[in-house]
Amino acid sequence: MKTLENLKYPIGKFEIPTSFNKESIEQWISIIREFPQKIQNEITSLSEPKFEQ
């Protein structure tokens, strides 16, 4: 059974990094850059009924 907390934060609460560097920023940018393609890859294989769920 999912708690309200799990429904509000399905991937967990955001934790502010205590420190970061250039490599961290580059990694975050890469994640953001790749996200649209990952979503596209996931939805192209869905049938219409599955897509509508």
Image (cartoon, grey):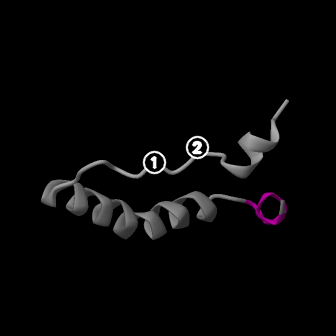
Q: Residues within 10 Å of mark 1 (few under 14, many from 20)?
A: few
Farthest-out residue, left:
22
Q: Quadrant of residue 31?
A: bottom left
Q: In this figure, what is the number of numbered marks?
A: 2
Q: Residue at x 44, y 67 (%)?
A: 37
Q: Residues within 10 Å of mark 2 (few under 14, many from 20)?
A: few
Prevailing secondary structure class for the magenta stretch in the rendered image: helix
Is residue 52 shown left or right of residue 12?
A: right
The residue tagged with tag 1: helix, strand or loop? loop
Quadrant in which the N terminus appears:
top right
Magenta-colored stretch includes residue 51: yes
Above or below for 14 versus 33: above
Alpha carbon separation for disc pair 1 and 2:
9 Å
Give the percent coordinates (x, y) of residue 8.
73, 51
Quadrant in which the C terminus appears:
bottom right
Q: Nearer the viewer, residue 45 or 37?
A: 37
Q: Do residues under tags 1 and 2 come within 8 Å of each other at their CB atoms?
A: yes
Q: Give the magenta range.
A: 47-52
Is residue 49 shown left or right of residue 31?
A: right
Q: Looking at the rendered structure, which numbered label has been put on residue 35?
A: none
Q: Residue at x 63, y 58 (%)?
A: 45
Is residue 45 shown left or right of residue 17?
A: right
Q: Residue at x 35, y 69 (%)?
A: 33
- The residue carrying mark 1 is 15
Closer mark to the observer between disc 1 and disc 2: 1
The residue tagged with tag 2: helix, strand or loop? loop
Q: Nearer the viewer, residue 53 or 19?
A: 19
Give the percent coordinates (x, y) of residue 24.
22, 54
Question: Label 2 sits on what residue type?
Answer: Gly
Question: Label 1 sits on what residue type?
Answer: Glu
Give the percent coordinates (x, y) of residue 52.
83, 65
